[in-house]
Image: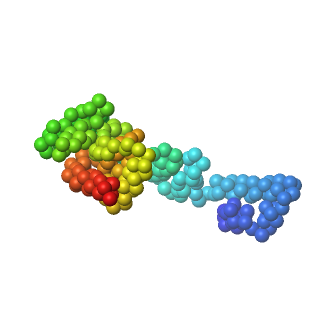
Amino acid sequence: MKLSRIYGTPLQIVRSPVLMPFIQSSTYHYRLGYSLIVCGFALLIVLANGCSPKSRIKNTDSTVVQTATVGESAERVRREAASQTDTVAADSTSAHTPSASSESLELLSLLAKQVETSGSVSKESDLQNMYIRYLTDEGYKPKVDKDGDVQFKHESKVYFISVDERDPEFFRIVLAGIWSIESELERQKVLVAADHSNATSKVAKVFTLRDRVWVSIEVFLSKPEQFRQIFKRSMSALQNGVIEFVKKMKE
């Protein structure tokens, strides 16, 4: 009969009421004595199990992989032990390193992101060409100005679309210099009118740059190409911001 059936498993022995005082004690000699007793019991159980005439245990990397009776064929034991060894090794490897399928999925995901990024509009020249093609199709005569922005005329006023390759999803239409500030008193009135326009208009932003008043439309897009869906309404909103500003200045 195995000693583990008489005394219990090593874990049950450690948790027994007899040995618990050694665990709870902070005295060095008690801890040393407890360690020796546990090691002695564990050794006895291992030796007793290994000497049993009815079974044998094969260990691979300190893991028990198979228990077979004497009457079983050696070939069957060998195959099952090899299978268990491969399983233990695979489990040990998967706990520390990603599986081949996981690595493949990660690689495919990275490649997909690179393809999506390379296919999107991000370079300055790409953005400029995209805006120019659209404006030309709409009947405008766009051109690239000295700052790299795309300039066009609408109702005798000069507008430009900002081009920023560092932030291609940011779409901005600007109408510069709609009003000149000629005095500090007028500047105060301009600020009041700009505040009124910003509060009553959608999206449009009226602001001062040195002694001139500018109006812009600024939005974020999921993709740069989406500006086509909002261009006409953006132009309408910008013009509404101008109307509100001028109306307040003339009061």
Depth check: give the residue in front, 76 or 134: 134
Extreme residue toward the bottom, this view: 17
Considering the image in quadrants, where does the N terminus appear?
Answer: bottom right
Whether residue 34 sits left or right of residue 245 in the image: it is: right
Considering the image in quadrants, where does the C terminus appear?
Answer: bottom left
Whether residue 16 sits left or right of residue 230 in the image: it is: right
| Residue 71 shows in the view | yes
Instruction: Specify the quadrant of the image occupied by residue 149.
Output: top left
Tell me what residue is drawn at x 60 percent, y 48 percent. 62
Tell me what residue is drawn at x 25 percent, y 37 percent. 150
Q: Position of residue 93 (x, y in %)?
A: 50, 45
Extreme residue toward the top, this view: 146
Q: Position of residue 154 (x, y in %)?
A: 18, 44
Q: How many marks?
A: 0
Depth check: give the residue in front, 204 or 24: 204
Depth check: give the residue in front, 158 or 79: 158
| Residue 230 shows in the view | no
Tell me what residue is drawn at x 82 percent, y 65 percent. 21
Tell me what residue is drawn at x 26 percent, y 32 percent. 145
